[in-house]
Amino acid sequence: MNEARKKRVALIALLLLGVGGATALALVGASQQINVFFSPSEIAMGKAQNVQRVRLGGLVKEGSLWRDPSTVAVRFKVTDRNRCVTVNFDKILPDLFREGDSVIASGLMQADGSLKADEVLAKHDENYMPPEVAETMAKAKALAAQAKRDHTQDCAP
Amino acid sequence: MMPELGQVCLLLALLLAGITAVVPMIGSYTENRRMMQVASFGTSGQFVFVAFAFVLLTYAFLMQDFSVLYVANHSNSELPVPYRFSAVWGAHEGSLLMWVFVQVIWALALSLFSASLPEKLRARVLSVMSIIAFGFLSFLIFSSNPFERMVPPSPDGNDLNPLLQDPGLIIHPPMLYMGYVGMSIPFAFAVAALLENRIDQSWVRYCRPWTNIAWAFLTIGIALGSWWAYYELGWGGWWFWDPVENASFMPWIVGAALIHSQAVTEKRGTFRGWTLLLSISVFSLSLLGTFLVRSGVITSVHAFASDPERGLFMLIFSGIVTGGALLLFALRGARVRVLSPAALMSRETLLLVNNILLISACALVLIGTLFPLIAEATNLGKYSVGAPWFGKMFALFTIPLLLLVPLGAFCKWNQDSLSRIMIQLLPAASVAVFAAGIAWLMARELPIKAVLGLLVAFWVMAGTFAFLWRRWKVTSAKRYTLEMLGMASAHLGLGLWLAGVVLVESLSVERDVRLTPGEQVEVGPYTVKMLSVEHKSGPNFEADYGRFQIYRGAELITELNPEKRAYRRGQVMTEADLRPHIFGDVYVALGEPLDSTGNAWGVRAYHKPFIRFIWLGAIFMAFGGVLAAAERRLRAPVSNTVKQPEPEPKPEVLSGKPALISANSAGNA
Amino acid sequence: MNARDAKTIRWWAILPFLLFAYLCVILYLNLKSENDPKSVPSPFLGKPIPTFVTTDLLTGSAFDSASLKGQPYILNVWGSWCPECAREHPILNQYAATANAIAIIGLDHKEVDPNDGKAWLERLGNPYRFVPVDPDGRIGIDLGVYGAPESYFVDAAGIVRYKHIGALSLKIINEKVVELSRAN
């Protein structure tokens, strides 16, 4: 095999190896770091059964914010006015976090159905709601209407 | 009256851009000198009008002319004077005007410094620059007019987003734009070369300084953004793999590949097609980035107010410019060889591997950034790609790349042996292992991954010093050319950057705690003690500010005053305070009051060891780019006759007879 | 360079262009889905608009949205804090001044201080038949509002026929109003 041919083969082999290896690693890494968005209703319906890392969006249920008296840890509920999910978070909440306002929490689902969040995002601007949350709210209203439930019956604070 | 004057200036600039795009191009085909000379006049004219328009918009902000809709939306009477300047480019319309302004500045510089270029090439290059300016000016005038009036005029304006009221943000966008837009120069050259069917390397030499300087600006712009995010956002992070950050990073990565590819093409005449393709790609990525940030397809705290109509315009424009160039490449650029005649172990091969790794890293960032869009469009679901994925994938490609960096300078062109190189680098390797060992002894808590990362960083730095040391023994005037020094500085910067990243990611300490006055928290070697939280008023905000004492052992180092500001227009901002130090920052941010008395507060305290190395590394890299650009050798005139592409050597010749290649292999600069 | 090599190189050369074309298609699809109102997940399209009771910004009297039934109307969501609404407003004024214009109801969304809303309307003009207030944003949440400006085109039976996100243009208003009257 002459030099040029050898080089061509080596290059193609390197490329294939590189692409194959990278793809494999990307896919493995992906399952751990790519987050899927769910609403509280979807989680209640069991759609997040096989997913560990979850992004949860909705509103912070009024009156549900509980603060640990000795640390900065908090617990609150995220609702779409149809269902709620409890969220635990042990860091400082973002600036625009308010009860009754939209929030996106991401983290790991626990066995008891609550979310242990490692990141909580409130909106970055006073007046805009993330599209995913707005969509969630609108869909959930339809679901609640179907179940003939009033929006105050989503969960106790 | 002034705003209308501004609009007129923009229209005149548009007219000139149109003329300069068409006339010199036609002149270059019909060999009409006078038509070609229109390029200089047209380019200067565009600069004058756009500059004047920019000055007028700035004036409107300074004079607080709230009859202009853009001024009313992004400024108000309480806005401090320095931020009235940065408000000019703080939102979509104004930043687009800045983009155009930077475009005509680069075009003017090119026009003034291109006397040594053959006339036809020069005419076509300036023509392409004007095509780009024409596109952006149309976009500006017809869909994003910064001079639009508000009737009746507002008595006072909305405020500038408080996040933007910061010195770092005054300079970050201009630096970025100088980089993004500067890459239109190699793009214009590539297109002009393809049009002329001039696929040789003479114009590449001319292009190198421009590309290096644009890349240096981009490096500084990105580093400023990272530094700003660190001290302003209050979360201690310096890079979030946010789609907008990725949009600025991709041109940088491919720009780095381009710089190396240009070096090969200029010195050896090979990689010509590859250099052409990269030249087209870098600017295309700049355009793509602009599209992503302004069209609303991605949601991000960084993104400008979204407008799908504007997005469509940008997409069409990018499609025409990039698509046109790539089509031209497919038709004309294919005439070059794919593989160079050099041996498997040679500097050419190393640089090819460098390019492949860099492009792959960029492709990964692109895929990760676009995946949520694709998933949404194809109804796969609402995905988002987390930062750790990007970090891991990026490391996957950069670690092999960094391992090879020291070899490049030691490897001969055309043919060399790996064993010979490794023997020369053995001292450097030993130093690196030794240094990594010392680091591990000094910080036993470092995980193995971090120690290995440090080893790579030290290897890069030691290898660079080994090169400088070897050149010391050369006694000619070419001992240390600016090009070599530029390379050394940039590679050194790379090592510093990696060391900073590894150390801060593995050693940083974050504590989120509840504190009352008198209480304290340990963070790394420092103790943060809260004294009190008091109230103060600013020009357009009310704030709570904390008084925190920082101790190292028993010694009082400083007092930090982080703030929580409530702006009159409703936004709440965290202003962290930090004590910078090359070996590690102490950083304190106020969370929120945890009880009704306002006595107990949530406080975030960080220790960020060696984080400054990250930006120091970037400064070295940018400085390297500037040094290399100043290399006098590169300013030799570009030949007027079109060199025919070298005929493909017959296979027998390739079995390594260095004497047949005329380049000087001993100096190997 | 033999014939086979020449062909191989040609093929590689067209690849970047093809990849780029593919990318443009994806981005275009994404843009369109943003722009396309049908893909906006308003679950009320074709369904009755949720009713609400609040007060009117300018008169102070009670306002019950159920009273709007019987006539088609446009429900425009705005706020004095919203710059894009200021851009849209002259268009609403223009439309309201035309003959046979249907009523526009202006929901003052997330207005912290009602005086700001009043001043804004005084300054920019008032095309609205009624101006219900929504200070804490609850009504907006019930309607599925993302932000402002947004507009709902509701027919005489109270069914939402179209939701528009972003500033309206005269062309869109005229088009959709014609559809509204045809719906009954």
Image (cartoon, rainbow, N blue to C red):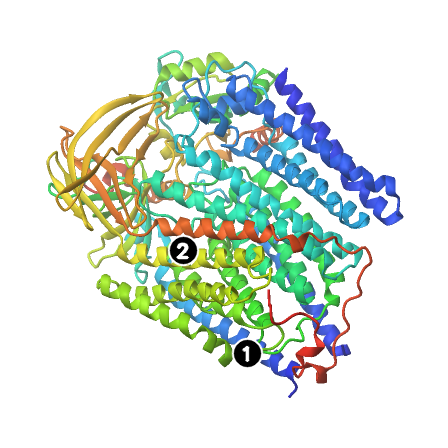
Q: In the displayed structure, would residue B409 be above or below residue A75?
A: below
> Which sits in the foreground, B415 or B130?
B415
**In which quadrant will I find the C terminus of chain C?**
top right
Q: In the displayed structure, would residue B327 be above or below residue B60?
A: below
Q: Position of residue B411 (x, y in %)?
A: 55, 72
- Are the residues under marks 1 and 2 on the same chain? no
Q: Is residue B384 left or right of residue B504?
A: right
Mark 1 chain: A
Is label 2 in a helix, a strand or a loop? helix
Q: CA distance from mark 1 to mark 2?
A: 32 Å
Mark 2 chain: B
In percent of the image, x 32 and y 48: which residue is there?
A: B582
**In which quadrant will I find the N terminus of chain C?**
bottom right
Q: Quadrant of residue B441?
A: bottom left
Three-letter residue code for mark 1: Ala
Three-letter residue code for mark 2: Trp
Q: Which residue is mark 2?
A: B497
Which disc is residue A13 wearing?
A: 1
Q: Is residue C64 visible?
A: yes
> Which sits in the foreground, B89 or B460?
B460
- The crowding category of the residue bearing disc 2, from other C-alpha atoms within 10 Å (few below 14, some 14 to 19, many at least 20), is many
In percent of the image, x 41 and y 17: which residue is there?
A: C117
